[in-house]
C-alpha cells in the first residue's frame, strides 16, 4: 500500500478538514497528502513519505520504535531470512530460555516490592529480546524456512 492510499483510508474515518484544523495546516495540503505524487504536480510528499526517507537515510530503527511507543505499541523487526526446520527444537528452547530470563529479572526486581528505573529498564530489555526471538521463530514457521531461527538463537546465546 502506498502512503497516499493509507491516508485516503484514514481520511474516510477522520475528514481532512478536521485533520487540517488539528494540525493547523491548510485543508488543501491535507488533501494533497492523499494524492499520488506526479511529475505534472499532483500530490506532495506527505509526512509518511518523509518518515520513511528519514529512516532510510539514518538507518536508525529507534525512529520507528519511538513512533510505535507514541502510538501505544512497540516495534519488532521482521527477520530477513527465515530458519530451517531441524533447528526448531533449539529455537523453541531459546524462546523458553528468554522467557525464563525475563521471569528471573522480574522476580529479582520485585523481591523488595519496588521496581527502580534501572530494574524497569532491565525488564524492558529482556522483554524486547524475548519478543525478537519469538518473532523470528514465528516468521520462520510461517515461511517454512528456519535458518534464521537457528542463527538468531545462536547470536542471543553468545550475547548472554
Image (spheres, grey):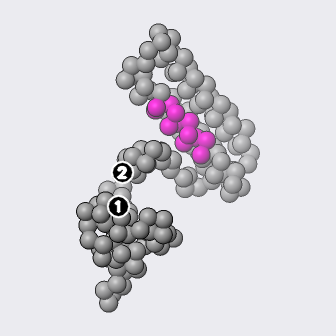
Dot 2 or dot 1: first in sequence order is 1
Crowding around mark 2 (Cα neighbors within 10 Å: few <14, some 14 to 19, many 20+) is some
Magenta-colored stretch includes residue 130: yes
In the displayed structure, 50 sits above or below 144; it is below
For marks 2 and 1, give the CA distance. Answer: 8 Å
Seen from the viewer's position, the closer of residues 65 and 95 is 65
| Residue 150 on image: x %, y % | 63, 43
Q: Residue at x 47, y 17 (%)?
A: 109
Seen from the viewer's position, the closer of residues 139 and 22 is 22
Task: Report if the CB atoms under discs 2 and 1 are less than 8 Å apart.
Answer: yes
Quadrant housing residue 120: top left
Seen from the viewer's position, the closer of residues 8 and 151 is 8
Seen from the viewer's position, the closer of residues 37 and 102 is 37
Q: Residue at x 26, y 71 (%)?
A: 26
Residue underneath mark 2: 63
Which of the numbered marks, if any, corresponds to residue 51?
A: 1
Identify the magenta region.
124-135
Q: Name the outermost residue toward the bottom.
A: 40
Whether residue 99 can be seen here: yes
Crowding around mark 1 (Cα neighbors within 10 Å: few <14, some 14 to 19, many 20+) is some
Amino acid at each position: 500500500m502506498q502512503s497516499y492510499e493509507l491516508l485516503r483510508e484514514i481520511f474516510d474515518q477522520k475528514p481532512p478538514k478536521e485533520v487540517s484544523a488539528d494540525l493547523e495546516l491548510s485543508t488543501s495540503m491535507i488533501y494533497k497528502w492523499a494524492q499520488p505524487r506526479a511529475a505534472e504536480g499532483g500530490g506532495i510528499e506527505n509526512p509518511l513519505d518523509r518518515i520513511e526517507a528519514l529512516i532510510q537515510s539514518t538507518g536508525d530503527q529507534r525512529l520507528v520504535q519511538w513512533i510505535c511507543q507514541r502510538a501505544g505499541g512497540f516495534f519488532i523487526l521482521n527477520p530477513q531470512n527465515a530458519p530451517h526446520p531441524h533447528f526448531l527444537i533449539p529455537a523453541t528452547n531459546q524462546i523458553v530460555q528468554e522467557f525464563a530470563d525475563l521471569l528471573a529479572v522480574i522476580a529479582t526486581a520485585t523481591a523488595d516490592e519496588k521496581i527502580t528505573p534501572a530494574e524497569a529498564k532491565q525488564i524492558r530489555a529482556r522483554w524486547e529480546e524475548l519478543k525478537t526471538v519469538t518473532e523470528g521463530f514465528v516468521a520462520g514457521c510461517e515461511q517454512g524456512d528456519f535458518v534464521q531461527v537457528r542463527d538468531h538463537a545462536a547470536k542471543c546465546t553468545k550475547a548472554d
